[in-house]
Amino acid sequence: MNLELFDIQGIVGRGYGKHPSAAYLLLEVEEPALARRWLAEQVERVHTCEQAPDPDAPCFNIAFTHAGLEALGLDAEALNTFPSELKEGMTEPERSRALGDEGGAADPESSPRHWDWGGTAAGQRAVHLMLMVFAPSEADLDTTIAELRLLLRPGGLSLVRRLHTALLADREGGVREHFGFRDAISQPGIAGLHRATSGQPLVPAGEFILGYKNAYDLHTECPRVHHSRDPGRLLPPAEFGAHDLGRNGTYLVVRQLGQRVRAFWQFLDAVSRDPNGAANPERRVALAARMVGRWPSGAPLVESPTEDDPGRATANGFGFHHSDPQGLRCPLGAHIRRSNPRDSLDPAPGTAASLAVNATHRLLRRGRTYGPPLSMSFDPDEILQAEEGEERGIHFICINANITRQFEFVQRSWINNSQFNGLLDETDPLLGTRRLPSGRPTDTFSIPGCPVRQRISGLPNFVVVRGGAYFFLPSISALRYLASLTS
Amino acid sequence: MLPQSTLTIVAPIQTAEAALEALRGVLAEIGRDPAANPLLPFGDLTGLHYGRFVILDGAVDPGSGRTVASSLAFNCCVDGPADQFLDHLMQKAGSGLWAVFQHCSGAPGPGDQGELLTWLRRHRIPTQTFYVNSLGRTVPQILKEAQLRERIDGFLDRKEGSTTAATSPSTVRRAIQHFVRGQNGLAWALRPEPPLPWAWRLRDGLHRIGGLAVGVLLGLLALPFVPLFLVLLRRSEINAPHPRQDPHFRLSQFDRRHLAPDEDFFIQNQFSVLGFIKPGLFRYATIRVILSVADFVVHHFFRDGDLGTIPFLNLHGVDTIHFANWIVVDQGKRVLFLSNYDFNLEDYMNDFINKVAWGLNLIFGHGVNYPRTDWMVFGGARDEQVYKAVLRKFQIRTQVWFCAYPDISAITIQKNARLRAGLFAELDPAAERDWLALL
């Protein structure tokens, strides 16, 4: 089935790599009528999947929280058709506990009570919508944002927070995250939109865009409005005579993850020292690579188990099961083997059946790093000498059509599962919580080996959640519909 | 090893609203600390794998339009005979049992434990299908083997650095054996777990052969009726209302918030679901036969860590379920399903859908409002979101849940058992390497 690219916001199709400067403006609706008029004007500027991005002009995308849709004036019946995770939000207490943000298992610092935005502290402002701005340069970005800010007050909106971003380009032409590893190598390709690359199968469009068949060959349920609420027929028809608010839209998960970069390398430095106490940089980076599953250049351990191989920096055409069933090359608990186990898991590891289940838990990542790098060269020795100083990390943004089955599943059942894939007492070495809710520590990391595994314990939290929310990323027609609402 | 038994007691709750409220109060008190509360300290009971109280709320039977009354279900799984356990439970927590069951109709007055015991026995009902992850693996075995692993892990962690890639697997294994021999509390680990009693195994073997023979015989006798059965089945499948037809029944319409506070505190979770059987004798008779057959099949063929793997049909099973009970309640009107599973519900549901949808359809497909099945095994649970919504809709709160080893997954239990079994066994070099990979 052909995708209606003209109706799908551009962020679904691309990460705007040629627009290195970006900011996410978190906005609150103060005057719904004015905000709708503002939206009506902005819709025409929203970049779609159909257009090639103009390298010299800024690109915009707009997403709404459930509270934002309500504030804009969407009726209660329609609001009620959104999935419960969007309705309840990322900080609903039981969900926060399950995600590892709050409660017995969580790092108290990650609690939504302490978040910089989207949290639960008294006086924290509501986040209603997020305007994503991508620009060719910092100067362009600043000009664009200055112009946008002038329109906010007359548009009935106020700025809650500007999330800054800073891409960490490396010398090899890739982007890194703050720990110093090349990032954004493995992305699911969308059938009908992307070309298959490096041997990885394309994922059905319905996993990332509402209105198309998903990996179960079904349509993920869409939010909808009563036909009487859409007399102008701005929305396509849906089941039971309703109008489809979801088609060509999707959901965004946004989490601001602060990274404790120096603590990460300090820990690795301490546990990789020689018996005589001397630092062992080679073992240190090898251990870090075991935690990540790739070397700093990006080369996967499955293909290059003993040393970094920049020639394989973007290699992605691998599975885990056949070449490395026991994790002797890439540990079973490595970050990339948890967050995308490929063919590792039941049913029937190493077969199409395993890959088919894996395809139901993919995330399309669209986030960007923020804050200055601790070392421009990402050299651990330099990082260890540097002052932590400013806050840095990643605005983790992922696109998925079913937040529970995709993002939340990956977070709970893979990243934070202390008995994932037969492991015991360990979670994701980069992102995981370090205790079970019952108090049992999960702060180890095991490296399978011959004759027997090695195990590192006492892993601290390297990542702190600083903010987050679930958003609906409407189609262009749904944006027009929202702009047309009357109160 | 000792075969496990399941024990279920279901009693009607007194009709006065106050009784239900008072019962909820007592259960909440127990539920705050199931292991060590003063009323019914589940942690003090020997051989108890898990125990739970579930309130089965009354509802209108869609078949007859009559109301089915509310009742209270107590269910547990124990090592050895259930009768013996009930005596033990009465001795340890007789007053706690009375505190709970006094709110049920016809419960005897306080003080007389003998009378209460008789009353409880009278309200005991059978489990039609009982699934156990690993037949015969007792609570002490599970706990001891987890402790053994922890001690060996600790030993290896301390030894780290003295083991290099050049150290041979047998050297490492010998060092582990030496360590275990030197530990006071681990003397039991020097010997393998004793097998199931021979008399039991003999009876069980005969049961298997006899059951298969009877099954084949009845199957042959039923053969002429298969076309009629298929016609009735298909008619029922086509005519029964199903949730896809209902504009108001969608994933977004269910509320999970009353269930979520009882979930995701441990590696294991509890799951209780209650639903009506589709009206009519056809569905009732079919599900009774299926549950009996399923009980026989899971007992004899899925008793060692896996549920549903059938290689010659290329079916992959599930290895994350500890226990499951299918219990027909309310004079055959409703089925109560109770299970203990690993990780979170989304995981559990995905496993069902991805791996054993056919099995779920066979059993749950006879329930009211189940997603439409085709020929009993196709369709149904494969309708992913609708199936998940149905499951959440019929899931009920588990007021009290105790588990003796809530932070150990079924896979870990299996691995621990293999670790212990191989510790002092004769192993060839390949098996020795595999054994070390368990750590």
Image: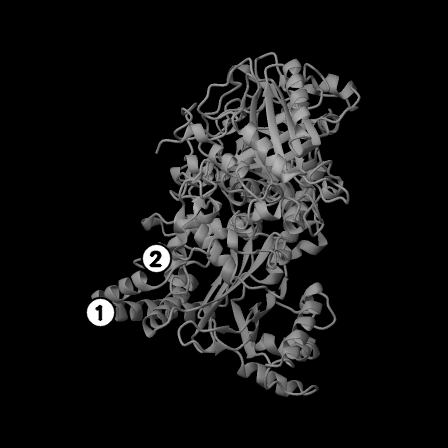
Q: Amino acid at mark 2?
A: Thr
> Between residues A407 and B53, which one lies in front from this camera angle?
A407
Q: Does residue B94 sit above or below B439 in this rendering?
A: below
Residues flagged by tags 1 and 2 on a common chain: yes
Give the residue furthest to the left: B224
Q: Position of residue B56 (x, y in %)?
A: 55, 71
The image shows residue B339 at horizontal and vertical percentages of 52, 61
Residue A5 in picture, x, y percent from top left? 42, 28
1 vs 2, front mark: 2
Residue of label 1: B225
B15 or A310, which is in the foreground? Answer: B15
Quadrant hosting residue A299: top right
Which residue occupies 68% across, 28% down? A163
Q: Is residue A160 left or right of residue B59?
A: right
Q: Are marks 1 and 2 in contact (CB under 8 Å)?
A: no
Residue B230 picture quarter: bottom left
The image shows residue A51 at horizontal and vertical percentages of: 46, 21
SS for callout 1: helix
Whether residue B438 can be seen here: no
Q: Quadrant of residue A280 in the image?
A: top right
Badge 2 crowding class, 10 Å Cα cut-off, few under 14, some 14 to 19, many 20 or more, is many
Disc 1 residue type (three-letter): Phe
Q: Nearer the viewer, residue A139 or B262?
A: A139
Chain under label 2? Answer: B
A457 on left or right of B323: right
Residue denoted by label 2 = B373
> Which quadrant of the figure contains the N terminus of chain B?
bottom right
Q: Residues within 10 Å of mark 1 (few under 14, many from 20)?
A: few
Render colour scheme: one colour
Q: Secondary structure at mark 2?
A: strand
